[in-house]
Amino acid sequence: MTEAVLPLQSLCDLAVRAAREAGQFIQGTDRSQLQRQFKDTGSSAASQIVTDVDCESEALIRQRLQAASEQWDIAFVGEESSQTASGLTPERLLKPYHWCVDPLDGTLPFVEGKRGYAVSIALVDQSGAPLLGVVYDPVDSMLTHAITGEGAYLDGALFSRAKSESSSLMAFADASFASDKAYAETVGILNACAREFGLAGVEVLYGSGAVKNALQVLDCPAACYLKRPKPEDGGGSIWDFAATACIAAEAGAWVSDIHGRPLELNRPDSTFMNHKGVLYASNERIGQYLINSL
């Protein structure tokens, strides 16, 4: 019996509708009434804070994807419902595909009333390869999506790279980067990278979640976003990078772990990415330089 071909365009259209609806729900909430809690995950405030809006956004997305998930045997992995009972194998390891969803990436800037948050939905196969990625920015009502092998799109038009005219190496960073024990070493490497390519210097930009940090790399002629490996849990999770890994690759940017290999987006033993780190770069030259230097 021939295996049915997954209808990626239809599934992408479904994910686009779900992301828009979730983003509009997020943007319509009263942030003064948020119920905040802290999860025992990761090592930073940004990774630990969760609100009722995160949970309700995830429930909305899951409901919108449910029928297609049942029809095509797709597991669901969401940031707010990713816990697996002890001794049980995660469903994402048992099924051929899984949705990888961050219902509100950048919760910290969201609760602080700042920009830098987004809805992220990806479809990933069992090997960990992202098949499609959808990101919706509720602040600007901006939708970015990609299907592997078919290019990246912004609001329905083919994605156009490098909107910024900066002559510096733009380094997008999570809020925790400034307190990282490897901060000084990393900034030194970034400055060396800037000199190597004749750039004016390095400008480190903070304030966004992982999803927006990755996408902002695409707007610059010379930019990067990286997470160095570390022994403790953290470094972001698979749902922080699954959608943007597809989008960035289809837009012609560099995406890998810190050793230059594809991101493990279906890691068997954890959802964290701290084991090998994460690297996005605006082009292969910058990506390879950083891989060889970090």
Image (cartoon, rainbow, N blue to C red):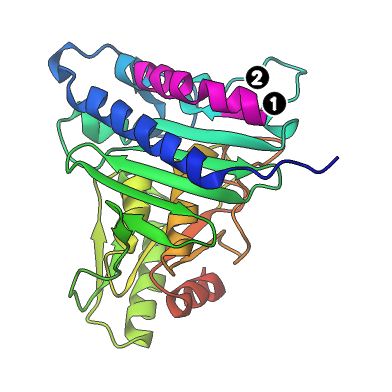
Q: Residue at x 72, y 32 (%)?
A: 95
- Residue that appears at 27% across and 64% down: 219
Using the numbered discs, state the Cα–Cα distance from disc 1 to disc 2 in whole angstroms.
Answer: 6 Å
Q: Amino acid at mark 1?
A: Pro
Quadrant of the image occupied by residue 140: top left
Find disc 2 in the rendering and name its residue: 84
**Residue shown at 48% from the left, 72% from the top:** 287
From where the camera sits, is residue 258 visible?
Answer: yes
Q: Which residues are magenta?
A: 55-76
Q: Is residue 102 magenta?
A: no
- The answer to whether residue 59 is magenta is yes
Q: Residue furthest front?
A: 1
Q: Position of residue 142 (x, y in %)?
A: 24, 46
Residue 58 in the image: state x and y as whole percent.
Answer: 42, 22
Q: Quadrant of residue 232?
A: top right
- Within 10 Å of disc 2 (Cα), the crowding (few <14, some 14-19, many 20+) is few
- Which residue is identified by label 1? 90
Q: Answer whether labels 1 and 2 touch (C-beta < 8 Å).
A: yes
Q: Along the polypeptide, which appears first: circle 1 or circle 2?
A: 2
Quarter of the rendering occupied by the N terminus: top right
**Amino acid type indicated by mark 2:** Thr
